[in-house]
Image: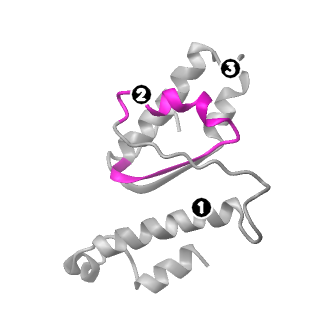
Amino acid sequence: MLDLLFESESFDIVVEKGTTDALYLDSGDPWNPRPETVSKVMKVLQGVHKVLKPDEVFIYISFEQPHLRRELFEAPCLTWSVEWTILSFCGLGEGTTAMNLLRNIINRHLEKSLDDLTTEQALNGSRLFGSREDYHDTLMP
């Protein structure tokens, strides 16, 4: 994640779970992390920003409090908009889990992306293989 070797704007969705949490393990004070930790985390975020297509989705999953990372995510060099959803293990409601929430976010994004395809793109399979149902059922059973 510190050196993503993908082309710019090559992903519709990027999911990051635990990479920056691992980088913060030796950061010292969470309110004032070491500069080398901040530099590494910014390198991860800049790499994700580079490979993510404009107006697409970066899903960041962390055990850390959002206010401790907000400044990094809202850095001027990152032109995305940030929306935070805080989950807890209690109070989600029966049958609701973090994985269900993640699945719903990805499903909503896939539906938007699929609806944005032109007929020519859909027929040529430039972004998908198989039908919408095949694609959806493969990723989200």
Specify whether 98 is left or right of 49.
Answer: right
Looking at the rendered structure, the secondary structure element under dot 1 is helix
**Can you say whether 137 is above or below 53 in the image?**
below
Amino acid, disc 2:
Ala
Q: Nearer the viewer, residue 83 or 56?
A: 83
Amino acid, disc 1:
Leu
Kindly identify the residue that appears in the image at 79 percent across and 56 percent down: 90
Residue located beneath label 2 in the image: 75
Amino acid, disc 3:
Ser
| Residue 100: % across, % down | 65, 67
Residue located beneath label 1 in the image: 102
Q: Which quadrant would the C terminus be assigned to in this image? A: bottom right
How many residues crowd around disc 2 within 10 Å: few (fewer than 14), some, or many (20 or more)?
few
Q: Nearer the viewer, residue 21 or 29?
A: 29
Residue located beneath label 3 in the image: 27
User: Over which residues does the magenta segment extend?
Assistant: 52-78
Kindly identify the residue that appears in the image at 53 percent across and 32 percent down: 70
